[in-house]
């Protein structure tokens, strides 16, 4: 039965390929790829000869229709990108949407993904994370985008190009403060490197060298300490009585307000209760 396969390819080391990926590439009628020159290197390494189709960001709409027409006509086509999983910060999302609409069978093979490698190697929380991908190139828009995730408590993952990574580190420091981060480059390649520490510590690593290679930036989420500090700052100018009145203005009873104010301010409940008597 004809199918569309989404096939992940190595993100650096060509040995990081599965038997199943090789089998699909060998059996496919055609291979759709982002850059025929890059894919040709992989296919030559494993002595695979197949007709190649161009499937790039700039021709996704037309190429998707052409490929799905071929699949519906009985062909099996494998879609690859230059590196990693198609559809993740690479072409692929459009054709899957169209395939679902047309009822075309889509099979996604498991395989390399730079964001997962970097996350696991980061030393940061892996239980919950948000993959953001590439930020906007413009300085202000980049900072605006970062601000959208400032209050998120899960780990954040970004992709960045070498000529923009220093500005992105500066932007993270401006928007998030000096959080802990991990910066990975050249994943699975000979010069793979992981820099871990605060934003300032990692930024200093590039004082005497120019960033090279594609980067994955992993940023720790907002900590409980940061959240508590912001809460404290939000009522720093309020007296206990004013704080009680503000909490009660949200519809809470005096009893509940006393408990909440005591917890927020980190003081004994009886101290807040004493002030609450002034409200009677």
Image (cartoon, rainbow, N blue to C red):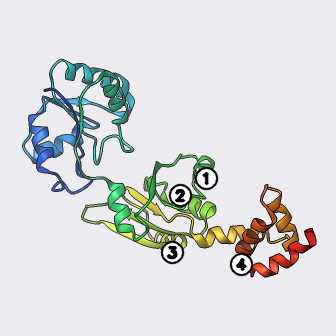
Residue 253 appears in the rendering: yes
Q: Is residue 9 left or right of residue 183?
A: left
Residue 239 appears in the rendering: no
The mark that comes first in sequence, 2 or 3, is 2
Q: Distance between the residues labelled 1 and 4?
A: 33 Å
Q: Name the residue under label 4.
A: 266
Q: Position of residue 199 (x, y in %)?
A: 53, 69
- Name the quadrant containing residue 57: top left
The mark that comes first in sequence, 4 or 2, is 2
Q: Position of residue 20 (x, y in %)?
A: 13, 46
Please give the label number shown on residue 143. 1
Label 4's element? Answer: loop
Q: Position of residue 226 (x, y in %)?
A: 62, 70
Label 3's element? Answer: helix
> Which quarter shows the C terminus?
bottom right
Q: Distance between the residues labelled 2 and 1?
A: 9 Å
Q: Is residue 178 left or right of residue 275?
A: left
Question: Pointer 4: residues within 10 angstroms few (<14), some, or many (20+)?
Answer: few
Q: Name the residue under label 3.
A: 201
Q: Mark 2 points at which residue?
A: 168
């Amino acid at each position: 039965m004809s199918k569309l396969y989404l096939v992940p390819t190595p993100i650096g080391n060509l040995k990081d390929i599965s038997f199943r990926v090789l089998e699909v590439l060998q059996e496919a009628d055609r291979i759709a790829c982002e850059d025929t020159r890059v894919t040709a290197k992989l296919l030559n390494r494993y002595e695979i000869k197949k007709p190649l189709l161009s499937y790039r960001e700039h021709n996704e709409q037309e190429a998707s229709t052409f490929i799905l027409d071929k699949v519906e006509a009985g062909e099996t086509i494998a879609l690859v990108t230059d590196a990693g999983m198609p559809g993740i910060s690479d072409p692929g999302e459009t054709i899957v949407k169209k395939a679902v609409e047309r009822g075309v069978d889509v099979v996604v093979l498991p395989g390399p993904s730079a964001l997962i490698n970097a996350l696991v190697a980061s030393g940061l929380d892996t239980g919950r994370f948000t993959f953001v991908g590439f930020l906007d190139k413009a300085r202000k828009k980049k900072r605006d985008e970062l601000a959208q995730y400032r209050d998120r408590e899960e780990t954040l993952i970004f992709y960045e190009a070498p000529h923009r990574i220093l500005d992105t580190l500066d932007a993270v420091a401006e928007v998030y403060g000096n959080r802990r981060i991990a910066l990975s480059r050249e994943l699975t390649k000979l010069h793979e490197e992981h820099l871990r520490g605060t934003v300032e510590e990692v930024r200093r690593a590039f004082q005497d060298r120019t960033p090279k290679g594609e980067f994955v930036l992993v940023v720790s989420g907002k900590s409980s300490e940061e959240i508590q500090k912001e809460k404290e700052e939000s009522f720093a100018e309020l007296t206990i009585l004013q704080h009680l009145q503000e909490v009660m203005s949200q519809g809470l009873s005096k009893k509940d307000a006393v408990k909440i104010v005591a917890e927020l301010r980190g003081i004994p409940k009886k101290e807040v209760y004493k002030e609450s008597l002034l409200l009677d």
